[in-house]
Image: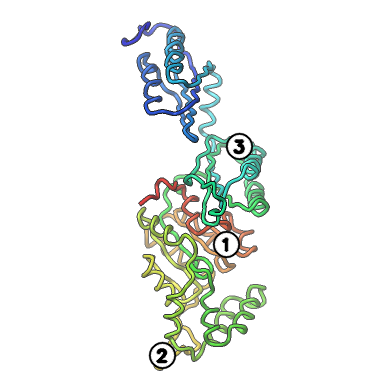
Amino acid sequence: MKNAGKAPTPIGKPELMLINITGADRVGLTAQLMEILARYDATVLDIGQADIHHNLSLGILFKTLNTMSGDILKEVLVQANALNVNVSFNIISESEYNDWVSRQGKNRYIITILGRKITAKQIAATSKVIAEQGMNIDSITRLTGRIPLDESAEAQTKACIEFSVRGTPKNLEKMQGDFMALSRKLNYDISLQEDTIYRRSRRLICFDMDSTLIRTEVIDELADRAGVGEEVRKITESAMRGEIDFEESFKRRVSLLKGLDVSVMKDIAENLPITEGLERLMEVLKRTGYKTAILSGGFTYFGNYLKQKYGFDYVYANELEIGPDGKLTGKYLGDIVDGKRKKELLRLLAQVENINILQTIAVGDGANDLPMLSEAGLGIAFHAKPKVKAEASQSISTIGIDGILYFLGFKDSYMQA
């Protein structure tokens, strides 16, 4: 074949060419096609490849000399025919290329959508919002493994795809609001994050405990054992309506626990209903070097139990006073860990770990978590109360707490032990 096996004499004008190859994937296909370009000393300006159900889509933008482009195309066509794949060619003008290069300086955002399954309706709605904001989708990547066809298994499945989007939103606040509205309407979760250096280097993640790491409120469990469950729940509801603040409601509820034997706490701790995905989340976070903390308006006894079981690095919560008779006194020790204190502790831990506050993550479900959610570099409302979900910039409501890993950009293939 003409020019095969030797470098052609570099005569002619530069020419930019885009080759698109589609068809059944096979081992060595990319190598064989790239060897042709290598023989002509082509410069690769951009390349992208995806494989969907063993079907390849490969695009190569390269620079060569116009006197060589015809020979390159002939060899590529012959090789494509031998490999039984389709190939198309486009000449790219210098102005088109320069326009593409200029767009590389624009802001990049990562949009993550996840749920038990992902539907065309959800992707269409997400893409429409992106287009309305004048932004362009550079790539779409699936982060989760293959979804089983057996819909009876859907209760524990996870589906997640990530959009890499370039441009500056016309109205970032509206875009965020539109996404939150879609998540409620179409029952999926959406995360919108600017793709900065801090997104790629999160180091500290702080969790609320009750109704976040565990599927209960420990004070309700204690109150039920003390025979005052109804009274405690009334106080909690009053606080949620804003009739009394967290500190006042905390003091009143704790006082009702007076006389409860401390042995009850051990039994409750050993039977806590753990949130779906917590074990997987903690295993991956520890393996990848994250520092983890529990910042809770609950109680240290239960926080320390979770710390020992799952390997949290820090626990800050409220300490119940225990009398010499081994019973709760109805009082507490130290300062109350409320919303303001959680925010302070988040900042303190960032300083202790010597990291920027933008490298922190906070996760919670209640109104007293909002200060730390807004302070952290990434605040996630997890199966949260409506008010919290409305005010948080990110939320997860459809799957377990290990969904956080996808917001951090982890793929299932990365997380195999």
- Residue 383's disc number: 1
Residue at the (56%, 87%) spot, across then down: 227
Image color mode = rainbow
- Residue 135's disc number: 3
For label 2, the residue is 326
Of mark 3 and mark 1, the one earlier in the sequence is: 3
Residue situated in front as seen by the camera: 123 or 104: 123
Disc 3 from disc 1: Cα separation? 30 Å
Q: In this view, does 85 lie above or below 181?
A: above
* Element assignment for label 2: loop
Q: Position of residue 417 (x, y in %)?
A: 35, 52
Q: Where is residue 255 in the image (x, y as percent from the top left)?
A: 54, 87
- Of all residues shown, which one is farthest toward the bottom? 325
Amino acid residing under circle 2: Gly
Q: Where is residue 54 in the image (x, y as percent from the top left)?
A: 46, 33
Residue situated in front as seen by the camera: 226 or 338: 226
Q: Where is residue 378 in the image (x, y as percent from the top left)?
A: 51, 55
* Element assignment for label 1: loop
Query: Which callout, 3 or 2, points to the residue nearer the camera?
Result: 2
Disc 3 from disc 2: Cα separation? 63 Å
* Element assignment for label 3: loop
Residue at the (62%, 40%) spot, across then down: 127
Sort mark 2 into few (<14), some (14-19) or many (20+) by Cα contacts within 10 Å.
few
Which of the 4 image quadrants contains residue 171?
top right
Amino acid residing under circle 1: His
